[in-house]
Image: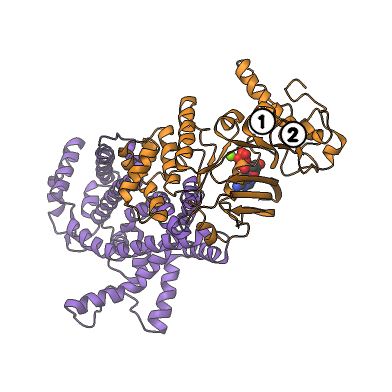
Amino acid sequence: MRAYLLARLGWAVPIVIAILIINFLIIHLVPGDPIQALVGDFPTPPGYAEQIRKEYGLDQPLLTQLWLYLVNLAGGNLGFSFANRQPVLPLILDRARFTLLLMLPALTCAAVLGVVLALAAAPRAGSLYDSSVTAISLIGFSVPIFWLGQILIIAFAIKLRWLPAQGMISLRETLTGWAAVADVLWHLVLPGFSVTIYYIAVVARVARASVLDALSQDFVLTAKAKGLSGRYVLWRHVLPNALIPVATVIGYNFGYSLTGAILVETVFAWPGIGNLFIASIGNRDYPVLQGIFLLTAVAVVLANVVTDMLYAVLDPRVRGSYGKNA
Amino acid sequence: MAVQPGNILEIDALSVTYRVRGKTVRAMNAASLTVRDGEAVGLVGESGSGKSTLARVSLGLIPRKIARIESGRILIAGRDATRFSETEWESLRGDPVAMVFQDPLTYLNPVMRVGPQIAESVRRHTPELPLDQRVEELLELVKLPSVVTRAYPHELSGGMRQRALLAVALGCRPRLLIADEPTTALDVTTQAEILALLKDLRRRLGMAMLLISHDLGIVASACERIYVMYAGHTIEWGGAGAVFQTPAHPYTVGLLRAAHAVRNAEGRFATIAGDPPNLAELPPGCPFVPRCSHALAECSRDMPERFDARSGDPHSVRCWLYEKPGLGFDRAGTG
Ligand SMILES: Nc1ncnc2c1ncn2[C@@H]1O[C@H](COP(=O)(O)OP(=O)(O)O)[C@@H](O)[C@H]1O
Ligand SMILES: [Mg+2]
């Protein structure tokens, strides 16, 4: 087990290093003076460009520059966003919190509901219920998320006036304590629902296939031959086996959750990473874009490591292949 | 409750069909078989003859969507289970009838330790017994060390897995154990060990056994009575010695000769000439006719109910050659 985890982590390290180097090279691949990539297109105070030139050693050899870049990164210095008047790292971490606030509950709900739907549908493959689950997940999968978002806004925010359409907090009043929390949750309903619907479809499609596959495995026959009930066999024998492929899909989507919300955040003006990303493209705020790229890449690598660990938890054969003594 | 001696399993002229891509595959054709309480019965036939179908249908393990019982009856401990619902079948599975399967790796849950897999049988069928102690007992019964409880199936050898699967079945306290080719996936030495274990367990636990194999020798050594199956028909049955020493049906004769030939002339596989029939297009009459060198006119018309095989023992055969006294062929093997 330990050997397996170390091997997986061992893989993550060179990948992260590669990401850092690519990020560094991007600065130099941007047409024109690399100073522009480090400062952005926003008007800057006089002398700032000169200061950056020195900080990153832009007049020195490339390797020295790489070294200085890494030193800056290690110190948490991802540059300064003049468009937002604050350093890049706290800015994107701040916005990442809001994105995760939207995405993590939605993905978790979707993972659970998608698997439960599949568990209910697969044993009755071909039935009306199963076909409806398949049809609904096909629709959920193919409906553009911004379209769904706008329909929801029209229905629940504009026509019915039940829920807020935009933003994360009410601007008209200043709330504190639990009232503020409730206010955020209130704003979370529509964007969260749009995201959840999509990911339920994504998870249910894969989960249904893998539950069907697990149901046809020989060990299910052994379990039934013991006299165990169909429901028990489904939860205790089929589900743990079916979860192994599903974990990949869920892990993958958690990895991309930081950028997965760009469309929803735009539609609902949710102040997360996606929104910042779009705004920064408009402002040609390169330091922020690079920061987002770096953060996303690292998140994907981390999610992969976590998924691999999940594999080891779900499937003893994976653990075994890296030595039984561990 | 005292167990009344009688038939624990009775398959009565059972016909089962699979629907495969619009075609009807006749896997069982009016096949009959009886297992009495405490008796060891063997079922032999080449691959595809319907042995596994018979075993599974006897436990209601083939979903209605996949296979249909066209006619005939399944009686378990005297109860007609032919039209049982899934819930009714659940009450018969494990106890009185348990089953072990051919490939012990795929038939154990790969992500569950062996101990809990055995414990499930115990909890389901004997919840009054102390669980851990009973699991230990079962492992001892199949001669596995108790560390196996914590192992995953992939960490065990083929023989150990088959023993574990056996412990799962025995944990149900069955009156009848159906063993579907329990040694086919194992190497020769392990085969012999598992077979010896099965014989020993049956004697000690006093349970009935239906041992399924494509190897007449294996079945003859472990069973009191034998059924021979061909293309979904039970074509011959009788005492193990009678069927093995004096096979009656031309197919059984050929089966035995092929087995001996493999042993004698190394390297050259002797088989029965011709191919097994296509179960989707079975002609009327005896399905062995195209491969039979003794076929009579009536053989292509229909199949006889049964004739006495005249080997001196209770021994029946479904072959027109036995209709009249004076056999038309030499059953010892040269004809
Ligand atoms: N699930 C199934 N679907 C369709 N056909 C099947 C299925 N299982 C078995 N059969 C067919 O039924 C026949 C008998 O198979 P089986 O009972 O497995 O024979 P055996 O155990 O003697 O090898 C074969 O022709 C096989 O192809
Ligand atoms: Mg078989």
Position of B228 with respect to A249 (left or right) is right
Q: Colour of chain B?
A: orange
Question: Which residue does the numbered mark 2 point to in the structure image?
Answer: B309
Residue B259 appears in which quarter of the rendering?
top right
Residue B160 appears in which quarter of the rendering?
top left
As measured in the structure, the alpha-carbon distance from the residue carrying label 2 to the one carrying label 1 is 9 Å
Mark 2 or mark 1: whose residue is earlier in sequence: 1
**Numbered circles on residues, count:** 2
| Chain letter, purple | A
* Viewer-closest of B106 and A24: B106
Circles 2 and 1 on the same chain: yes
Circles 2, 1 touching at the beta carbon (< 8 Å): yes
Check disc 1 and give the amino acid type: Ala
Taking the image as drawn, is residue A61 in sight? no
Q: Position of residue B179 (x, y in %)?
A: 53, 40
Q: Position of residue B145 (x, y in %)?
A: 33, 36
Q: Mark 2 Cα within 10 Å, few/some/many (few <14, many 20+)?
A: many
Residue A197 to residue A35: above or below: below
